[in-house]
Image (tube, rainbow, N blue to C red):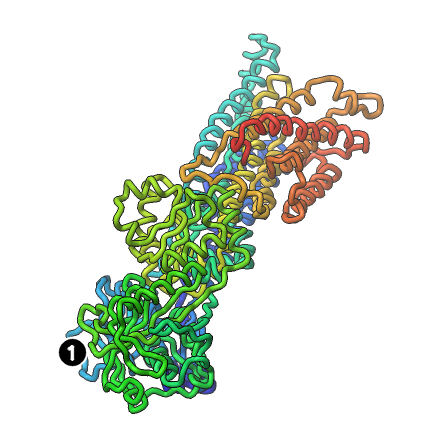
Amino acid sequence: MKYTHTGLTNAEVQLYRAKYGSNELEMANQESLWSKLVGNFKDPIIIILCVALGLVLVLSFFGMTEWYEALAISLAVVLAVLVSTLSEYKNEASFRNLQQEASRILCNVFRNGNITKVNIGDLVRGDFLLLQSGDKVPADARIIDGELHVNQALLNGEPESIRKSPATEPRKNDDSPFSNSRMVFRGSVVDEGEAVAVVEQVGENTIFGQLNRELNIKSERLSPLQVKLADLATLISKFGYIAATIIGISFMFNRVVIAQDFDLNLILTYLQDWRVLVQDLLNAIVLAIIIVVAAVPEGLPMMIAIVLSLNMRKMLAEKVLVRKLLGIETSGSINILFSDKTGTLTKGSLEPRYLLSGNGQSYMGYDAIPEKLQEMVRLAILENTFSVLNPNGEPIGGNSSERAIVKFISPEKRSYFHSRSVHRNVIRFDSSRKFSATEVEGDDQFKAVFEEPVITLVKGATEIVMQNCTHFIDETGQRQPLNKNQEEKIMESADGLAEKGIRLLTLAYGSEGIDKEKSIPKNLTLIGALGISDEIREESADAIANDFRAGINVVMITGDRKGTAIALAKEMGLLKNAEDIVLSSAEMNAMDDDQLVELLPRLRVVARALPTDKSRMVRIAQSQGLVVGMTGDGVNDAPALKMADVGFAMGNGSEVAKESSDIVILDDNFSSINNAIRYGRSIFKSIRKFIIFQLTVNLAAVLTALLAPFFGVEFPLTIIQLLWINIIMDSLAAIAFGGEPAISRYMEEPPIKRDANILSPYMIASVLTGGIYISVVSLLFLTVPAFKDFFIRNGAFDIEVFMAAFFNLFILMILFNGFNARTEKFNLLENIRKNPGFLRVMALIIIIQVIITYVGDEILRSKPLLLTEWLIIIAVAFTIIPVDMVKKWVFGFYGNKGYI
């Protein structure tokens, strides 16, 4: 098919854009930085800190505490709010930019006399659009050539397709705008047909743009993983509140009872001194509040946003574009993957090799075909294709098979093709029909070849077309009867080629027109069958093998004949054992669901597949508790993509498929699907690593603060020190663990279960081991005289230096445990170079800690330490690493229970 429209010039495009505006739509208003800042002051933890600040200010006013404690809490509040606000704002902006990238649509437009692809936002009023099946209409436009069937459900909720054509009758005043048969509207979907339309409204002036303004409301819906993290945070918060209450009570017990040597008279005397009593009560309340702040993992629900922000750009570099958060979260759990073949497992560069004529003769290349038969083949292809030829004769649009067979014709024989024939009716190719047809009222050139004024050209699957053929064209261009032996010979040739991985697309014509049911015409004359091959991607075999090692069952779903599918599946390593099963669509449909459930673990290929087969396989797999991944690129794939747990659309697929998907694979490569799965697993693991680190700090801080008073140490960690620890375990740790690499080793582990608890047995053991060990070492350090002997200054024990050393010991144990948390392997530096942010954060904490030690003085209860004192606390802190290795060694005996 060829159009003569020239479209706008570049100068006209600039003029119309300035005059009528852009085709960009306003995005939902992002919450301003100031609004987000104010909103974060309403966070419960910030409110609790502000209460603590108020109490400390009261104590400071009466001289019961130092002024710098109030200053420290103020700084902690400001810092917590600023870090949270900036992090959220940056992450939202990053994700927003990626979503804009995901929503970009390329449109076929006539400009400067050529057909070119432009971004949807670059369209202007007056542009000439080429709309084809599977396109999403990018602007409100008036059809001037061709015919479409358009689904406008997004705009008016009506599921039926509406016929659109260049109708001349005016629209009635009381009609809905959507009933205008000449107009197509932005957001609607082309179900069938092809047309040229002139853009009349762009951007906010389209009907979709007006609806977009009304519906531009930010969704507050959380993903399942965010819900799990929020639930975990709530559970731990309850523990934190209980622990804080107990610690507050134990603090008062220490002051009232233990400090008075359990003497009743001293206790009564203490209680009578209301000033001291009130001061201690307020200190107990402030301590309890700070314990709540330290124990409650308020940053946990936001961890997913930080991890995604740090990983989505990496994923984009590996040709994976995330459209929905749920998709990348769930991809790590996929255990069955239904994959298309063409362009995904194969290169998608279809090559027509030769023509098989009706009498069984093979012609290698177009130029080898006899002249009369050659001309018939040329017209049968060019008059019955939904690819459009540009001025150079190169095909644009249509499916990959159509573009391939157009290229079968010599360039010089297609570049000057200009048809004056009239296309009365068309049937576009559909995977359920497996043929396409065009009813042609021919021009003089056409009539001279086919010797009839009106015929229907047909192309499609060999078995579909052949069963309706009664004649064939011989090498001289004459029409001959097709007998049973010839038909069987052609089908045998098709079977033989299929076993070599070559599929046939058969050309025929007939005098019958296209009926209302759009069934294939009868009494066809066979022109020939084109043999088309598609080379398997070099990486497909390795990618499939990796999936099987990762516990993912791969099923290839293809429209090819069973023989072709088997040959290709064997070559790519999908079929290895006699137990592996290949089913055709017909065989599948002859089985009930129970039979398919039984075969599913061994199913490897579905041949001659229909779109309904995909949806059925997804439904059956999900009924067995499997997490299903599905790939697709066509309009008919949309239901299965939506139904699957993770829908993967191909970058070169239809816009409808992309809209229905969770993830877009930009390079259409099966290996990139594996990359998405690997990142899904990595993100889940990064969050789990962060949880191990954070909960270990929570447990250690709470246990130490709870038990130390019973050993005579009222404040093992001061309020200000606890606030610094809280900053380490929340914001800084999230950045450190958020950058963990998506390593290939994760694809050697079983999939994450759909209902997997966010806390695994390994994680619980890690938290208990680290938290209890840090607490025990802390208490031993504080109470065992041997440790105090290392902190003698001027011949006497220096308590201030000793407590400064303890603070550094606690921080160092946390940091060393960070290395433990990032891997379940003994090599703590595994892939550390792939996460330089981890080392930078750890180095930053150490630098700040050293500065605190030497300049913190009374504010942070710090004193400069000698080199020997540093070596002592480093050596003691380092012991957490061998202790954790013992835990890893124990878990090594428990198979996958040893995975994070």
Res 562 → quadrant: bottom left
Quadrant (top left, top right, bottom left, bottom right) of the C terminus:
top right
Depth check: 426 or 139 in front? 426
Mark 1 Cα shell of 10 Å, populated few (<14), some (14-19), many (≥20): few
Identify the residue shown where x is 59% and y is 14%.
258
Apparent side of residue 845 relative to residue 398 in the rendered image (left or right)? right
Residue 716 picture location, percent across and down: 64, 26
Identify the residue shown where x is 60% and y is 17%.
710
Residue that badge 1 annotates: 172
Q: Give, as a three-letter code, the residue at label 1.
A: Lys
Identify the residue shown where x is 22% and y is 73%.
523
Apparent side of residue 352 relative to residue 247 in the rendered image (left or right)? left
Residue lying at the far bottom in this picture: please name it: 444
* 767 lies above or below 191: above
Depth check: 282 or 759 in front? 759
* 886 lies above or below 264: below
Residue 669 picture location, percent across and down: 49, 59
Identify the residue shown where x is 39% and y is 41%.
601
Q: Can the viewer see residue 336 in this picture? A: yes
Quadrant (top left, top right, bottom left, bottom right) of the N terminus:
bottom left
Q: Can the viewer see residue 121 in this picture? A: no
Res 839 → quadrant: top right
Apparent side of residue 244 relative to residue 825 in the rendered image (left or right)? left
